[in-house]
């Protein structure tokens, strides 16, 4: 089976002056053209290659060697190269740019800017297209996700409430401003944790664990850091948030709570200048 808009394992079926015809092992009817200008030197009938399959203006299947920046079903940050009345074009790593039709745009596209784009194979037009209206393709509800699940997030929009994110390439969620302790922008990729799945399936995400497991992990990370620096650290509860984030990837509030817990456990001592490991 040939998967348009994706990488395929293909076999060279025939050679012509203009290039080659390729197909899958079990499909001799649908042929894919690989122009001679894109073919590797020495290619011959019977060779097996991996190629990205798309369509040309006549809806004929064509092959490209190498993987573009995203395949059909994937979402990634792309740079807009141009815009017309019918759509905008994005650099996705192939000779021809990816078209995002106007009706699939969340808002007007400005050439030179970066946007989060979802690629898909459009049966009606027979083309691989892009979309910035992500809710057409990604779920805004996910009852199968649970509080505390680790996830990968891609920021695609900023609102008054927070940052809209793509979760695990499948869902849409939000990181509220109050939970965004580090700088986020459209296109930022970050690890996250499911904070809450609402009754309607909508998803709230935080950047760090706030449960007992997260607190314990941070406490042990602080102890290990102290051991690695001879039992002394100048990173105190008065240190700037960006310095704390750079060292431990957490908010200042979380760091202060962890220090407080370690102090109560009598594992550290704290003064204005430093945190010191208590010798056993």
Image (cartoon, grey):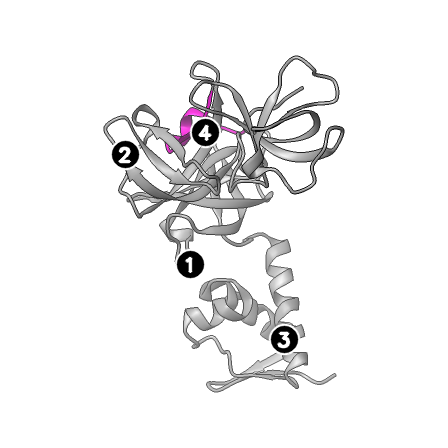
Crowd tier of the residue under label 4, counting other residues whose Cα lies within 10 Å: few below 14, some 14–19, many 20 or above: some
Q: Is residue 131 magenta?
A: yes
Q: Quick check: is 140 in the magenta stretch?
A: yes
Residue named by callout 4: 140
Q: Nearer the viewer, mark 2 or mark 4?
A: 2
Q: Are marks 4 and 3 in contact (CB under 8 Å)?
A: no
Q: Position of residue 258 (x, y in %)?
A: 56, 67
Pointer 2 residue: 107
Circle 3 residue: 225
Between 73 and 276, the residue placed more toward the observer is 73
- Marks 1 and 3: in contact by CB < 8 Å? no
The tag earlier along the polypeptide, 3 or 1, is: 1
Q: Which residues are magenta?
A: 127-142
Q: Residue at x 41, y 74 (%)?
A: 240
Marks 2,4: beta carbons within 8 A: no
Give above or below for 251 relative to 52.
below
Left or right of 185 on screen, residue 234: right
Quadrant hosting residue 96: top left
Residue 129 position within the rendered picture, expressed as x and y whole percent measured from the top left:
43, 27
Name the residue tied to disc 1: 181
Disc 1, SS:
loop
Q: Residues within 10 Å of mark 3 (few under 14, many from 20)?
A: some
């Amino acid at each position: 089976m040939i998967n348009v808009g994706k990488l395929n394992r293909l076999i060279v079926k025939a050679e012509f002056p203009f290039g080659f015809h390729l197909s899958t092992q079990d499909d001799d009817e649908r042929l894919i053209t690989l122009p001679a200008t894109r073919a590797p030197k020495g290619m011959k009938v019977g060779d097996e290659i991996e190629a990205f399959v798309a369509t040309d203006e006549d809806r004929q299947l064509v092959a490209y060697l190498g993987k573009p920046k995203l395949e059909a079903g994937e979402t990634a940050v792309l740079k807009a190269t141009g815009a017309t009345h019918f759509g905008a074009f994005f650099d996705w790593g192939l000779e021809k740019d990816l078209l995002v039709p106007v009706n699939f745009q969340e808002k007007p596209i400005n050439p030179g800017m970066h946007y989060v784009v979802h690629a898909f194979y459009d049966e009606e037009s027979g083309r691989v297209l892009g979309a910035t209206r992500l809710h057409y393709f990604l779920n805004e509800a996910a009852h199968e996700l649970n509080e505390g699940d680790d996830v990968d997030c891609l920021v695609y929009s900023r609102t008054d409430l927070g940052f809209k994110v793509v979760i695990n390439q499948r869902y849409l969620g939000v990181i509220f401003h109050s939970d965004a302790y580090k700088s986020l922008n459209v296109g930022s990729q970050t690890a996250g944790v499911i904070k809450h799945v609402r009754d309607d399936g909508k998803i709230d995400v935080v950047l760090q664990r706030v449960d007992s497991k997260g607190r314990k992990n941070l406490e042990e990370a602080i102890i290990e850091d102290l051991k690695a620096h001879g039992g002394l650290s100048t990173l105190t509860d008065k240190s700037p948030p960006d310095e704390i984030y750079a060292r431990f990837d957490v908010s200042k509030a979380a760091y202060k709570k962890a220090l407080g817990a370690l102090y109560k456990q009598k594992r550290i001592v704290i003064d204005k200048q430093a945190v010191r490991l208590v010798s056993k």
